[in-house]
Image: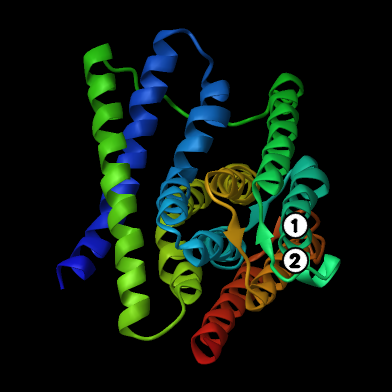
Amino acid sequence: MMTYILFIIGFYFLIKGADLLVDGSSSIAKKFKISNIAIGLTIVAFGTSTPELVVNVFASIKGSTEIAIGNVLGSNIANILLILGIASIIYPISAKKNTVLKEIPFSLLAALMVALTANDALIDGSSFSAITRIDGLIFIGFFTIFLYYTYGITRSDSDINEPPVKVMSIVKSAAYILIGLTGLVFGGKWIVEGAVAIAEYFNVSQSLIGLTIVAVGTSLPELATSAVAAFKKQTDIAIGNVIGSNIFNIFWILGISAIIRPLPFVATSNFDIVVNIAASIILFFAIYVGKKHTLERWQGVVLVMLYAAYVVFLVITR
């Protein structure tokens, strides 16, 4: 029983820890005269992905690789179908041309890279499929390219919403960072242990728990960010947050996880990869239907319905 209680508390620790880490780090960065936009594209972007990262690191160390892969794939699917769907229902989301023509395809490339690197048995005829350490290094290489591209946007696009940064004393900032890291460590540990226990108790795969409960739980920072941005009609932040998170999740988080420990891959997860790829393609074309570069409310409803159908299918089949 205590494991299940800590599993629930772990999500609070994880999300609050990430929030405190971002606030403390951003404050120190501001003290050193680092621009708001640079803080937003580095500390804040990494910060909202720390829940997925910490859970995956613990899952990799523990050998629960199904949770590690399921968490990333499930988070990416939830980001597009659920979170972006909810955000566009709150307020229609208009995307910049860069987001539509470059960032969404880059997110699609990330999903395709998982399909290619994970299917050794299907592609090479190997007896064993895994995302290996070399694959992880390749992912990190793509992630570096994405960071360089993002830095280029900040140099050329003056119309980027800069996140506000609250400046605190060095002592308070350091305390925020320390408490945040502590929350992340304990939260991540409890979530992985709880996910394994739930899977064993209900006799379901760890992959199912990773794709659903853990994935949605670790995506709560993205949900909060996109929902608030949509409510404030800052739609570029709403969609940019989701697409950026999907790229981070695969190239950065899955890359780091594979470097820590190669991730064995089961063929059933190919369905989740296909859904991930399909979600990116649907998003790309949905923005072109009706009002150009706008995801309208009715399209958001369709995305949420697709996510509900996907979860029901998972529960029935796994």
182 horizontally vs 73: left or right? left
Query: At 27% across and 13% down in the image, what residue appears?
Result: 170
Which residue is labeled 2 in the image?
119
Give the structural element (helix, strand or loop) at label 2. Answer: loop
- Toward the viewer: 43 or 317? 317
Give the structural element (helix, strand or loop) at label 1. Answer: helix
Residue most toward the front? 127
Report x, y in % for residue 304: 56, 73
User: What's the residue type where badge 1 is placed?
Assistant: Thr
Query: At 64% across and 30% down in the image, what residue appears?
Result: 160
Which residue is labeled 1 in the image?
117
Q: Is residue 152 visible?
A: yes
User: What is the number of the mark on residue 162?
Assistant: none
* Image quadrant where residue 116 sits: bottom right
Q: For the N terminus, which image quadrant?
A: bottom left
- Toward the viewer: 316 or 87? 316
Report x, y in % for residue 137: 68, 40
25 horizontally vs 128: left or right? left
User: What's the residue type where badge 2 is placed?
Assistant: Asn
